[in-house]
Image (cartoon, rainbow, N blue to C red):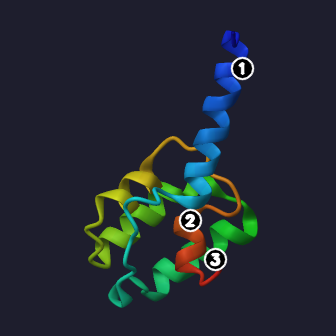
Amino acid sequence: MQDAGGRGEQAAQATLLLDIFGNPFRPIALESEWLTSTVLALAEGIYQDRAFDRMPILADALQDAGCDSDDVLTHCRGPGPHVRGCWVVDVLTGRK
């Protein structure tokens, strides 16, 4: 039988995996119009500076650029944790 600490660890690992890989059952098609200079600069800055507290700002910029993907916007505005390798940042910066 697994203790509460083990379940907590599994939940934390699952959260990190979702941040890195997203939902494999709901792939996102990146729209070229989302790739404004503001979005790209924010995404690159988040990656380079590991400044994942800027993810809600990235969500706003994406929405301003026409992004209507609930998965992308909800992920960016979510509590995280976000880590280097975050699927949204990697897709936007061409790392994935």
Percent position (x, y) of residue 15? 58, 41
Provide the residue designation for mark 1.
6
> With 53 as the anchor, is 65 left or right in this view?
left
Residue 4 position (above or below residue 14): above
Q: Earlier in the sequence, mark 3 or mark 1?
A: 1
Amino acid tagged 2: Trp
Residue 82, labelled with which disc? Answer: none
Q: Earlier in the sequence, mark 2 or mark 1?
A: 1
Q: Quadrant of residue 34?
A: bottom left
Percent position (x, y) of residue 59? 41, 62
Residue 87, labelled with which disc? Answer: 2
Mark 3 burial class by Cα count in 10 Å: few <14, some 14-19, many 20+: some
Q: Earlier in the sequence, mark 2 or mark 3?
A: 3
Provide the residue designation for mark 3.
44
> With 80 as the anchor, is 33 left or right in this view?
left
> With 55 as the anchor, is 4 left or right in this view?
right
Amino acid tagged 1: Gly
Residue 4 position (above or below residue 84): above
In this view, the mark in front (2 or 1): 1
Mark 2 burial class by Cα count in 10 Å: few <14, some 14-19, many 20+: many
Amino acid tagged 3: Glu
Residue 64 versus residue 30: which sits nearer the camera?
30
Percent position (x, y) of residue 31? 35, 84
